[in-house]
Amino acid sequence: MTEPTAASGPVERNHDGQAFLVWVTGQDRPGITAGVLEVVARSDAWVQDIEQLTLRGRIILGLALDVPSGTDLLKDLLWFGWKNDLDVDFRAVSHESTPRAIGHVVTVLGRELSAGSLRAAAQAVTDSGGNIDRVVRLAKYPVFSYELIVRGGDTDVLRTNLMEAAADDPHLDVAVQREGLRRRAKRLVVLDVDSTLIQNEVIDLLAEEAGMGDACRAITERAMAGELDFREALVERVGLLAGASGAIIDRARTRLALTPGARTFVRTLKSLGFRIAIVSGGFSVFTDDLRVELGLDHAYGNELEVVDGVITGRVVGPVVDRARKAELLRSIAEAEGVPLDQTVAVGDGANDLDMLAAAGLGIAFNAKSLVSDAADTAVSVPYLDAILFVLGVSRDDIEEADTEAFGGPLQYPAV
């Protein structure tokens, strides 16, 4: 016995009538969609497509119908609209449906999104040869975010145009992803820690507590100027801590500040079944605490050597540098049984570049231009959970999860 399959395509119908596009608009209220479909059903018309949205209490209902010959469907729909104070419009079209072009999802976000910012994104789509098929609002708090479904256009040109538009507009961030199952199948997020999950740089905190803050910052500046690689800079900065009491670790712990939205980001992803890991060029004494505090699944950092309560100024074990972060991403994904194309990496520094490149989606968060230019997308607003919008999670989804857990949506600290 063979199993039935839909692989052969949709059921074909004899087109003995006319195809129409029908739009119904007016004040939204319960029963409109059911009422329209009741009228359609009485005529034995075939619904080829239907979409609906509401905007500020107004309904916009669109239907593509195959209308049999000899029916009064259009007249009946006009009568239904008149009785219910709705506008009904229609247009005859060809029976032939337009093939679906390659789809992209363009996420637009910013603390402020003016008409000019939105126009710049829309023009970038047009200039790439694409067409905006649909616009959906994802959030208006703590940032504004919209999702643009784009059909057609060249992927590389689309990405380049949108990145240029974002570079010219300080209020605009954009993310471009291919539409489809892979985009919705992300299951593992791996985050950098310093200046990503937290607002601090832990080596700076330790150096300040040890009275070596200025010297530590000078080394950091040399590393940022390309005079030192990460490993060399780490060794020099940790060397500044030699002889300091281990008590400075506890004092530095009290100064750690999570990035606004970090708890919401983690909590929402966990509710969606994601696995979450942190990999840090900082130290395991801090990443271990964060793993417990936030309920993370994996945490890795450098091992700061402390002997008899005194920091030796050395790091023991493998250094979590640029290559090691990418290696950890791959090993965590393997351990969790998650393909690499279903992983997301988030970071801000050059030390994160290999990890961002290895992940299915690499996101630069408030990063230097070197990192933003290399990542799949960049987010520059100061809220970590804005990344959820790039993953297609709406603000309504977040608030629903918060309501279930806490009885209502949570607020953000001022930034």
Image: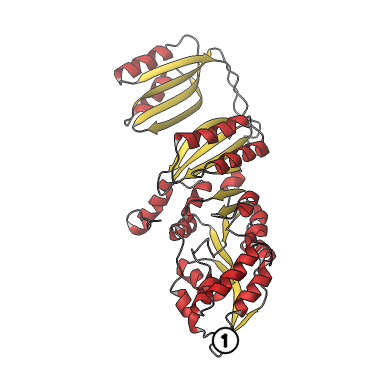
Classify 228 as above or below 268: below
Q: Nearer the viewer, residue 353 or 407?
A: 353
Q: Nearer the viewer, residue 181 or 39?
A: 181
User: Quick one: 332 or 364, which is closer to the camera?
Assistant: 364
Query: Does residue 30 appear to the left or right of 415 in the view shown?
Result: left
What SS does tag 1 mark? loop
Can residue 204 be seen in the rendering of this structure? yes
| Residue located beneath label 1 in the image | 243
Indicate the position of residue 274 as horizontal and vertical percent values.
Answer: 53, 57
Judged left or right of residue 81, residue 178 is right
Q: Residue at x 42, y 11 (%)?
A: 72
Residue 58, how many percent across, how many down?
Answer: 35, 29
Q: Identify the image quadrant of residue 132.
A: top right
Q: Point out residue 66 in the picture as x, y percentages from the top left corner.
A: 52, 18
Q: Residue furthest top?
A: 70
The amino acid marked with disc number 1 is Gly
Q: Is residue 69 above or below residue 103?
A: above
Q: How is the image coloured?
A: secondary structure
Q: Is residue 395 left or right of residue 302?
A: left
Task: Find the residue positioned furthest to the bottom.
Answer: 308
Q: Residue at x 60, y 35 (%)?
A: 103
Q: Position of residue 105 (x, y in %)?
A: 56, 40
Q: Classify the position of the C terminus by image quarter.
A: bottom left
Q: Nearer the viewer, residue 160 or 37?
A: 160
